[in-house]
């Protein structure tokens, strides 16, 4: 697996300390460093395109407000992505209560940008649909590993499980996704 | 499809949504929201104090209730408690105690010494006998 470009954790630590001391600029810089990977994670995990921006904001707000609970047990980005998973779960719950379900890919593509629609490959669409069918833990483990390039130890710490269990979840997810993408 | 192809597809997922995100605007909005709702610590502290206050009310309320219950229980068993220390009481003190048991004494089960109609005519030994008979 190709290692992703990860921002230096030491810099994150310094920014977090600055934010704890009340430095708003540090918070803004943390957003700048992690917003796009977070948006990618949320969109892949099923966030409707129109809501990605709001969900990214909500994730950062929650993270900054509970930053005292972050003790460097994993990288800040990993911790942020798990908060993003919770934010998305709450969003889905609220949407189902309002009976306004997120649009599926087919409907969204029909009303979306034709150019973007043309760019989206069939395999990607199938993978996105397959991810929605996975249990939440399998989906998050798969995305943290395959998309974000995290090690099992890091994933396990973030999701409060063991590296072995994370590995098992990943392999289950891969097997299921292959069945969906290659019927 | 091999694992590498799957991972490659996974890496591309959500890239359009990420590219569309205005990071600078998002950072600005996040900071504004944090500034507008600086309730992080205050809310936590308020909640904590509320919990502590609620716990104190429960503890104090419970203590008062238990004390009242004990006092009530003490009144019910007054005769028994008094009777335990009868030997220490003087005649006058025994009479005072008996005054509080007037209603009980009027019952038929109390063994009043033969020939006596008024408690004030009884001596200390007779009063002790009356009280001990209340003990049951």
Image (cartoon, grey):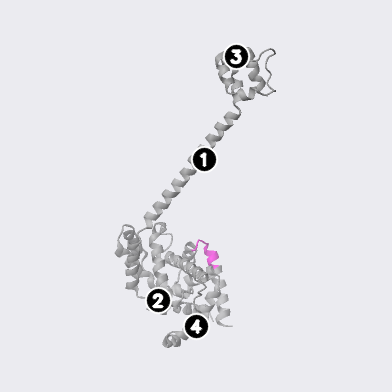
Residue B64 in sight here: yes
| Residue in the picture at 61% in, 23% down | B102
Chain letter of the residue beneath label 2 in the structure image: B
Residue B101 placement, left or right of A28: right
Q: What span is colored magenta in the figure?
A: A159-167
Q: 10 Å neighbourhood of mark 4: few (<14), some, or many (≥20)?
A: few
| C-alpha separation, residue under disc 1 versus residue under disc 2 | 57 Å
| Labels 3 and 2 positioned on one and the same chain | yes
Q: Which residue is mark 1?
A: B62
| C-alpha separation, residue under disc 4 versus residue under disc 1 | 61 Å
**Circle 4 or circle 1, nearest the eye:** 1
Closer to the N terminus: mark 3 or mark 1? 1
The kind of secondary structure element at disc 4 is: helix
**In the image shown, does A164 or A91 lie closer to the viewer?**
A91
Q: Which mark is residue B18?
A: 2
Q: Which residue is mark 3?
A: B120
């Amino acid at each position: 697996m190709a290692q992703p470009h990860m921002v230096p954790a030491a810099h994150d630590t310094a920014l977090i300390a600055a934010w704890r001391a009340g430095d708003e600029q540090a918070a803004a810089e943390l957003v700048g460093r992690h917003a796009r990977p977070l948006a990618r994670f949320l969109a892949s995990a099923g966030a409707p395109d129109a809501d990605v921006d709001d969900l990214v904001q909500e994730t950062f707000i929650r993270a900054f407000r509970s930053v005292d609970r972050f003790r460097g047990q994993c990288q800040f980005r990993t911790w942020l992505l798990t908060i993003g998973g919770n934010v998305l779960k709450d969003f889905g719950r609220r949407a189902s209560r309002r009976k306004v379900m997120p649009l599926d890919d087919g409907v969204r593509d029909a009303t979306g940008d034709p150019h973007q629609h043309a760019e989206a490959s069939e395999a990607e669409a199938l993978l996105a649909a397959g991810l929605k069918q996975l249990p939440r833990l399998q989906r998050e483990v798969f995305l943290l590993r395959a998309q974000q390039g995290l090690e099992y130890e890091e994933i396990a710490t973030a999701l409060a499980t063991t590296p072995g269990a994370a590995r098992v979840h990943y392999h289950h997810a891969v097997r299921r996704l292959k069945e969906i993408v290659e019927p | 499809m091999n694992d590498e192809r799957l991972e490659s597809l996974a890496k591309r997922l959500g890239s359009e949504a990420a590219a569309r995100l205005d990071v600078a605007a998002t950072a600005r909005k996040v900071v504004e929201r944090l500034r507008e709702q600086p309730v992080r610590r205050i809310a936590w502290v308020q909640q904590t104090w509320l919990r502590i206050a609620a716990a104190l009310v429960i503890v104090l309320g419970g203590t008062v209730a238990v004390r009242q219950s004990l006092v009530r229980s003490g009144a019910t068993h007054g005769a028994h408690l008094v009777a335990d220390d009868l030997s220490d009481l003087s005649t006058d003190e025994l009479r005072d105690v008996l005054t509080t048991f007037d209603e009980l004494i009027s019952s038929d089960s109390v063994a009043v010494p033969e020939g006596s109609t008024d408690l004030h005519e009884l001596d200390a030994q007779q009063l002790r006998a009356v009280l001990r008979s209340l003990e049951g």
